[in-house]
Image (tube, rainbow, N blue to C red):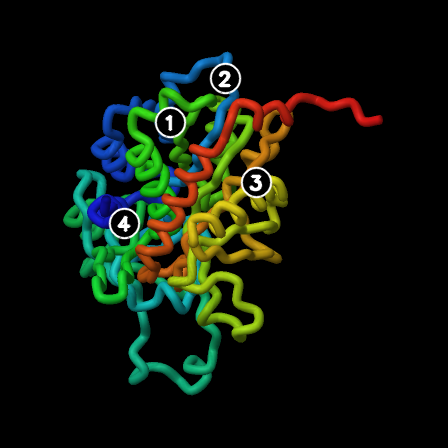
Amino acid sequence: MSYLNLIADLSNAYGISGFEDEVLDVVAANKGDFTLQVDHMKNGYLNLGAKDHNKPTVMLDSHLDEVGFMVAYIASNGQIGMQAIGGWVASSVQSQKFAIKNRWGKYISAVSSSKPPHFMTATEKEKSLRLTDLRLDVGASSAQEARELFGIEVGQPVTPAVTFDYLEEKQIMLGKAFDNRLGVAAVLAVFQELGDQVADLPFNLVGSFASQEEVGLRGAKITSRLIDPQMAIVFEATPSDDFAKEPSLVQGSMGKGPQLRYRDSTYIASDYLNQRFVDLASQESIAIQKAVRAGGGTNAGAISLNNKGVEILTLGVPARYAHTHHLLASYQDFSDMVTLTVAFLKSLKASDFARYQLQEKK
């Protein structure tokens, strides 16, 4: 089954941290027969209503939000100041198209400012660009016009304006917000692939769609407490480094399989789960990549510390140009990630969870 339409709808949805409503609407439209519950923080829970408290629980995590901006102020000339929501590099923001949700709920097209070279001094051309140098322009001529004609107010969300595209010959996806709409799609796809078998698993399977990951893993601190899993798989679109590093240092190449993240600045993955996935990948003839990251982080950092601790791993689709408007990723990598996860879940037995009991060491 192809999940391209699902990925396109998720990618095209606007949803920076704290404003994930549209993404949740796409999730709701694709949940099938499973229950979807949403809390006041805009976290979503798939199949939580069917949880049997006599069974252990496996959590499939993803996050709904994407990086963007928030209207911080409106200058007297009508230009709009931005506060970054999530990590951005200034050079990736300049001269790009954005959508501002105004006070009437309508999206207003805007372009991020740039000074034409005709008006720049030699010093300005050499100066490093900062985010604080950039503003948004909707075509207003004054602050009053920006507010009254365009409906712009402080605190409104600003989202990259990009439409999903697909190169079928190479199975390459192009779009915004793959971090982490590919993870959201993976959770839905795994449930779709398992279907009625979910109820017969020797454990509860709960899908999680966390809010506000890009601003401090906030949603996952809530979802992990409510779901209270013993085991978790975090789905991500991991930054591909195949165009950022010399070949010997590359750990995540687009089109060369999903990536297991062994470590980042927020957690260390379960060696037991990692090895299970490596062995299954070999059995399924699926290529898999391994990464040890010096920085970065995922919801695994929050989930792993829940309650008595959660055995966890992060499985990701390598995506080029993370935290920019336009990302590239391989649909085959996504499909292999789903296939591998389904195989893993089917391989789990009730006895696999006995290891979560406290053991006396002699």
Q: Position of residue 158 (x, y in %)?
A: 30, 50
Residue drawn at (60%, 56%), measured in percent from left and top?
A: 292
Q: Residues within 10 Å of mark 1 (few under 14, many from 20)?
A: many
Question: Which residue occupies 53% across, 62% down?
Answer: 251
Is there CB contact under 8 Å for labels 2 and 4? Answer: no
Of the residues shown, which amino acid type is indicated by label 1? Tyr
Q: Secondary structure at mark 4?
A: helix
Quickly name the residue at label 1: 45
Q: Which residue is mark 4?
A: 11
Task: Looking at the image, tell me whether mark 3 or mark 4 is earlier in sequence order.
Answer: 4
Distance between the Cα atoms at labels 2 and 4?
35 Å
Can residue 25 be seen from the camera position used here? yes
Q: CA distance from mark 1 to mark 2?
A: 18 Å
Q: Residues within 10 Å of mark 4 (few under 14, many from 20)?
A: many
Q: Which numbered disc covers residue 55?
A: 2
Q: Which mark is residue 273?
A: 3
Picture mark count = 4
Q: Amino acid at mark 3?
A: Leu
Nearest the viewer among 64 and 329 is 329
User: Is 278 on the left or on the right of 198, as rendered?
Assistant: right
Q: Nearer the viewer, residue 61 or 287?
A: 287
Q: Give the x, y percent position of residue 139.
A: 18, 61
Between the C-alphas of marks 2 and 3, the distance is 19 Å
What type is the residue that disc 2 sits on? Answer: Lys
Q: Is residue 292 above or below residue 114?
A: above
Q: Is residue 152 visible?
A: no
